[in-house]
Amino acid sequence: MCCNRLLYTGFLAFTLLVLPGVCYGGDDFAISSEVAAIEHPASSPSGKYILHVMAARNSKPVALFFEIRAKNGELVFRSTDLFYAHHMTYFLWDNADRVWVYSGDVGTFFWEQKGGEWKKYSYVDEDVAAPLFLKEKRPRRHSF
């Protein structure tokens, strides 16, 4: 029992402390202000919102989701989509205050506020240019 608890604690520490840096492309999120990660929220270009990346509780493998909060901390939107941390995953803003998520597992999506609601779109189905960060990090998947 003691060994199982120790293994679980070690796995949990690795998952929450080491894996996010790997999944977000190493130090990329530290250099790019538009990219968010666990314990590293990112402000929208307009300054109206803050993007927070969260780990879903009791999820195995570890799954991530995001929240959009107002500058005062009030919850504006919480994603119901989960993205598994063991795949390359980026959470970021574009210049139009859209939230983008790239997942090596399920693709690229963005959320845009329209009429007071945040709506999800699939990048491959829309005629919207991907943020420069995604074009640089994943050029084969984000050409326009």
Image (tube, rainbow, N blue to C red):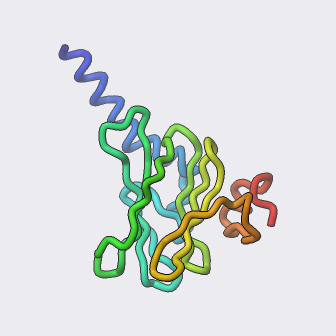
Q: Residue 52: image x %, image y %? A: 40, 63
Instruction: Report whether 2 appears left or right of 46.
Output: left
Quadrant where the N terminus lies?
top left
Image x and y of residue 82, in percent = 47, 48
Q: Nearer the viewer, residue 132 or 10?
A: 132
Instruction: Give the residue displayed 70% in from the left and 67% down from the top.
Output: 130
For the C terminus, the image quarter is bottom right
Q: Quadrant of residue 106?
A: top right
Q: Which of the pair 133/26 is nearer the observer?
A: 133
Q: Quadrant of residue 50?
A: bottom left
- 118 sits to left or right of 2: right
Q: Quadrant of residue 70?
A: bottom left
- State whether residue 42 appears in this view: yes
What residue is drawn where x is 47% and y is 52%? 81
Estimate the x, y position of residue 27 in percent, counting from the top left.
Answer: 54, 55
| Depth check, front residue: 47 or 69 | 69
Tell me the residue at 49%/42% (across/down). Answer: 85
Pick the residue in front: 137 or 63: 63
- Asked if residue 31 can be seen in this view, the reply is no
Residue visible at 61% across and 79% down in the picture: 95
* Number of numbered callouts drawn: 0
Would you place residue 44 above or below residue 137 in this image? below
Q: Is residue 144 above or below residue 90?
A: below
Q: Residue furthest left?
A: 2
The x and y percentages for residue 83 are 50, 46
